[in-house]
Amino acid sequence: MAKQLHYNTMREIFTRFQTAEAEPEGELEHVNVYTLVVAVALSAQATDIGVNKATRALFKIADTPQKMLDLGIEAVTEHIKTIGLFRNKAKNVMKMSQMLVDDFGGEVPNSRAALQSLPGVGRKTANVVLNMWWQQPAQAVDTHIFRVGNRSGIAPGKDVDAVERAIEDNVPADFQLHAHHWLILHGRYICVARKPKCGACIIREFCQFEDKTQ
Protein backbone atom coordinates (compact mmCIF):
# COMPACT_ATOMS: atom_id res chain seq x y z
CA MET A 1 0.00 0.00 0.00
CA ALA A 2 1.22 3.50 -0.82
CA LYS A 3 2.20 5.81 2.02
CA GLN A 4 0.08 8.88 2.77
CA LEU A 5 1.39 11.88 0.85
CA HIS A 6 2.69 14.97 2.65
CA TYR A 7 0.35 17.95 3.21
CA ASN A 8 2.21 20.22 0.79
CA THR A 9 2.06 17.56 -1.92
CA MET A 10 -1.69 17.13 -1.29
CA ARG A 11 -2.18 20.87 -1.68
CA GLU A 12 -0.35 20.84 -5.01
CA ILE A 13 -2.32 17.83 -6.29
CA PHE A 14 -5.71 19.34 -5.49
CA THR A 15 -4.66 22.75 -6.77
CA ARG A 16 -3.97 21.06 -10.10
CA PHE A 17 -7.33 19.28 -10.06
CA GLN A 18 -9.04 22.59 -9.26
CA THR A 19 -7.18 24.43 -12.03
CA ALA A 20 -8.16 21.75 -14.55
CA GLU A 21 -11.83 21.76 -13.49
CA ALA A 22 -12.93 24.27 -10.88
CA GLU A 23 -16.50 22.98 -10.47
CA PRO A 24 -16.56 19.22 -11.11
CA GLU A 25 -20.02 17.68 -11.25
CA GLY A 26 -21.44 14.22 -10.87
CA GLU A 27 -22.63 12.58 -14.07
CA LEU A 28 -25.93 11.15 -12.81
CA GLU A 29 -28.89 13.04 -14.25
CA HIS A 30 -31.58 14.20 -11.82
CA VAL A 31 -34.24 16.91 -11.53
CA ASN A 32 -34.46 17.27 -7.74
CA VAL A 33 -33.07 15.71 -4.57
CA TYR A 34 -35.54 12.80 -4.66
CA THR A 35 -34.54 11.77 -8.18
CA LEU A 36 -30.88 12.17 -7.16
CA VAL A 37 -31.34 9.69 -4.30
CA VAL A 38 -33.09 7.25 -6.63
CA ALA A 39 -30.43 7.63 -9.33
CA VAL A 40 -27.54 7.10 -6.91
CA ALA A 41 -29.22 4.04 -5.38
CA LEU A 42 -29.79 2.61 -8.87
CA SER A 43 -26.14 3.21 -9.83
CA ALA A 44 -24.79 0.51 -7.50
CA GLN A 45 -23.03 -2.07 -9.70
CA ALA A 46 -24.12 -0.11 -12.79
CA THR A 47 -22.68 2.71 -14.89
CA ASP A 48 -23.90 6.31 -14.71
CA ILE A 49 -24.52 6.19 -18.47
CA GLY A 50 -26.74 3.15 -18.11
CA VAL A 51 -28.67 4.65 -15.22
CA ASN A 52 -29.20 7.94 -17.07
CA LYS A 53 -30.54 6.08 -20.10
CA ALA A 54 -33.03 4.18 -17.93
CA THR A 55 -34.19 7.07 -15.74
CA ARG A 56 -34.72 9.90 -18.26
CA ALA A 57 -38.24 8.80 -19.14
CA LEU A 58 -38.99 7.61 -15.58
CA PHE A 59 -38.12 10.93 -13.94
CA LYS A 60 -40.32 12.84 -16.39
CA ILE A 61 -43.38 11.10 -14.98
CA ALA A 62 -42.26 10.23 -11.44
CA ASP A 63 -40.19 12.96 -9.81
CA THR A 64 -41.69 12.68 -6.30
CA PRO A 65 -42.13 9.72 -3.92
CA GLN A 66 -45.92 9.80 -4.30
CA LYS A 67 -45.75 9.85 -8.11
CA MET A 68 -43.39 6.87 -8.00
CA LEU A 69 -45.84 4.99 -5.75
CA ASP A 70 -48.72 5.90 -8.05
CA LEU A 71 -46.76 4.56 -11.02
CA GLY A 72 -46.51 1.16 -9.36
CA ILE A 73 -43.85 -1.54 -9.07
CA GLU A 74 -44.49 -3.12 -12.48
CA ALA A 75 -44.07 0.14 -14.41
CA VAL A 76 -40.97 1.11 -12.40
CA THR A 77 -39.46 -2.32 -13.04
CA GLU A 78 -40.12 -1.95 -16.76
CA HIS A 79 -38.39 1.45 -16.85
CA ILE A 80 -35.20 0.24 -15.16
CA LYS A 81 -34.95 -3.29 -16.58
CA THR A 82 -31.72 -2.45 -18.44
CA ILE A 83 -29.94 -1.81 -15.11
CA GLY A 84 -28.23 -4.63 -13.20
CA LEU A 85 -30.22 -6.11 -10.29
CA PHE A 86 -33.25 -4.17 -11.56
CA ARG A 87 -35.94 -6.23 -9.80
CA ASN A 88 -34.44 -5.78 -6.36
CA LYS A 89 -33.69 -2.11 -7.06
CA ALA A 90 -37.30 -1.49 -8.17
CA LYS A 91 -38.53 -2.97 -4.88
CA ASN A 92 -36.13 -0.72 -2.95
CA VAL A 93 -37.27 2.38 -4.88
CA MET A 94 -40.88 1.60 -3.95
CA LYS A 95 -40.02 0.89 -0.29
CA MET A 96 -37.92 4.06 -0.15
CA SER A 97 -40.71 6.13 -1.67
CA GLN A 98 -43.25 4.70 0.79
CA MET A 99 -40.99 5.46 3.74
CA LEU A 100 -40.39 9.02 2.51
CA VAL A 101 -44.16 9.56 2.31
CA ASP A 102 -44.94 7.87 5.64
CA ASP A 103 -42.04 9.04 7.81
CA PHE A 104 -40.66 12.20 6.20
CA GLY A 105 -43.69 13.97 4.75
CA GLY A 106 -42.57 13.19 1.20
CA GLU A 107 -39.32 15.13 1.67
CA VAL A 108 -35.81 13.71 1.45
CA PRO A 109 -34.04 14.14 4.82
CA ASN A 110 -30.66 15.82 4.94
CA SER A 111 -28.84 13.93 7.68
CA ARG A 112 -26.67 10.91 6.97
CA ALA A 113 -28.42 8.73 9.56
CA ALA A 114 -31.89 9.52 8.20
CA LEU A 115 -30.77 8.95 4.61
CA GLN A 116 -29.21 5.63 5.54
CA SER A 117 -32.48 4.53 7.13
CA LEU A 118 -34.02 4.49 3.64
CA PRO A 119 -34.18 1.12 1.83
CA GLY A 120 -31.39 0.79 -0.74
CA VAL A 121 -29.43 3.73 0.67
CA GLY A 122 -26.04 2.94 2.18
CA ARG A 123 -23.32 5.25 3.43
CA LYS A 124 -21.89 5.85 -0.04
CA THR A 125 -25.27 6.86 -1.49
CA ALA A 126 -25.97 9.09 1.51
CA ASN A 127 -22.60 10.80 1.11
CA VAL A 128 -23.17 11.44 -2.60
CA VAL A 129 -26.54 13.08 -1.87
CA LEU A 130 -25.17 15.14 1.03
CA ASN A 131 -22.32 16.35 -1.18
CA MET A 132 -24.14 16.96 -4.45
CA TRP A 133 -27.37 18.42 -3.13
CA TRP A 134 -26.57 19.97 0.23
CA GLN A 135 -22.96 20.89 -0.53
CA GLN A 136 -21.58 19.04 2.47
CA PRO A 137 -17.93 17.88 2.26
CA ALA A 138 -18.97 14.22 2.44
CA GLN A 139 -16.72 11.70 0.72
CA ALA A 140 -18.43 8.87 -1.19
CA VAL A 141 -15.78 6.23 -1.86
CA ASP A 142 -16.46 4.07 -4.90
CA THR A 143 -14.14 1.69 -6.78
CA HIS A 144 -12.54 4.60 -8.68
CA ILE A 145 -11.69 6.57 -5.54
CA PHE A 146 -10.49 3.44 -3.75
CA ARG A 147 -8.13 2.70 -6.65
CA VAL A 148 -6.83 6.26 -7.08
CA GLY A 149 -6.45 6.78 -3.33
CA ASN A 150 -4.37 3.66 -2.89
CA ARG A 151 -2.32 3.86 -6.08
CA SER A 152 -1.34 7.48 -5.64
CA GLY A 153 -0.99 7.82 -1.88
CA ILE A 154 -3.70 10.52 -1.79
CA ALA A 155 -5.86 8.36 0.45
CA PRO A 156 -4.44 4.91 1.19
CA GLY A 157 -6.63 2.46 3.08
CA LYS A 158 -7.45 -1.24 3.30
CA ASP A 159 -11.19 -0.70 2.85
CA VAL A 160 -13.60 2.04 1.73
CA ASP A 161 -14.09 3.32 5.29
CA ALA A 162 -10.34 3.75 5.75
CA VAL A 163 -10.05 5.57 2.42
CA GLU A 164 -12.98 7.82 3.36
CA ARG A 165 -11.26 8.71 6.64
CA ALA A 166 -7.96 9.32 4.84
CA ILE A 167 -9.64 11.82 2.50
CA GLU A 168 -11.38 13.60 5.39
CA ASP A 169 -8.20 13.68 7.46
CA ASN A 170 -5.62 14.56 4.81
CA VAL A 171 -7.22 16.53 1.98
CA PRO A 172 -6.95 20.25 2.85
CA ALA A 173 -10.29 21.65 3.99
CA ASP A 174 -10.66 24.11 1.11
CA PHE A 175 -10.66 21.18 -1.35
CA GLN A 176 -12.96 18.85 0.61
CA LEU A 177 -16.23 19.86 -1.09
CA HIS A 178 -15.14 18.72 -4.56
CA ALA A 179 -12.54 16.12 -3.57
CA HIS A 180 -14.65 13.06 -4.28
CA HIS A 181 -15.71 14.30 -7.72
CA TRP A 182 -12.15 15.12 -8.75
CA LEU A 183 -11.02 11.67 -7.64
CA ILE A 184 -13.93 9.84 -9.29
CA LEU A 185 -13.39 11.62 -12.62
CA HIS A 186 -9.63 11.02 -12.42
CA GLY A 187 -10.24 7.32 -11.82
CA ARG A 188 -12.90 7.06 -14.49
CA TYR A 189 -10.95 8.72 -17.30
CA ILE A 190 -7.22 8.76 -16.45
CA CYS A 191 -6.30 6.37 -13.62
CA VAL A 192 -8.34 3.53 -15.10
CA ALA A 193 -8.15 0.02 -13.70
CA ARG A 194 -6.34 -2.04 -16.32
CA LYS A 195 -4.01 0.38 -18.07
CA PRO A 196 -3.86 3.81 -16.44
CA LYS A 197 -3.17 6.72 -18.76
CA CYS A 198 -0.16 7.93 -16.82
CA GLY A 199 1.14 9.94 -19.77
CA ALA A 200 -1.92 12.18 -19.56
CA CYS A 201 -1.95 12.42 -15.76
CA ILE A 202 -1.58 15.92 -14.28
CA ILE A 203 -0.37 14.54 -10.92
CA ARG A 204 2.00 11.89 -12.31
CA GLU A 205 5.11 13.30 -10.62
CA PHE A 206 3.53 12.94 -7.15
CA CYS A 207 1.90 9.53 -7.66
CA GLN A 208 3.43 6.55 -5.86
CA PHE A 209 2.09 3.94 -8.30
CA GLU A 210 5.10 1.87 -9.36
CA ASP A 211 3.81 0.40 -12.63
CA LYS A 212 3.31 3.69 -14.47
CA THR A 213 2.53 3.57 -18.19
CA GLN A 214 3.89 6.00 -20.78
Image: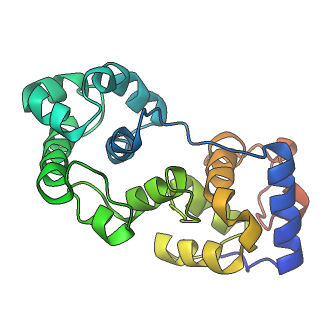
What residue do we see at 73% from left, 79% from top? 4
What residue do we see at 53% from left, 50% from top? 132
Q: Position of residue 59 (x, y in %)?
A: 32, 27
Give the image quarter of residue 109. bottom left
Relative to residue 195, is residue 161 drawn left or right? left
Give the image quarter of residue 124. bottom left
Relative to residue 91, is residue 12 drawn left or right? right
**Residue at the far front in the pictured view:** 105
Protein image colouring: rainbow
What residue do we see at 61% from left, 50% from top? 184
- Up the image or down, 49 lies above or below 163; here it is above
- Up the image or down, 142 lies above or below 97; here it is below
* Viewer-closest of 169 and 31: 31
The count of marks equals: 0
Residue 142 makes an appearance in the image: yes
Relative to residue 204, is residue 151 drawn left or right? left
Split into 4 quadrants, where in the image is the C terminus? top right
Q: Position of residue 212 (x, y in %)?
A: 80, 54
* Viewer-closest of 96 and 124: 96
Relative to residue 96, is residue 132 drawn left or right? right
Q: Position of residue 80 (x, y in %)?
A: 25, 28
Split into 4 quadrants, where in the image is the N terminus? bottom right
Residue 156 makes an appearance in the image: no
Q: Position of residue 77 (x, y in %)?
A: 16, 29
What residue do we see at 65% from left, 61% from top? 177
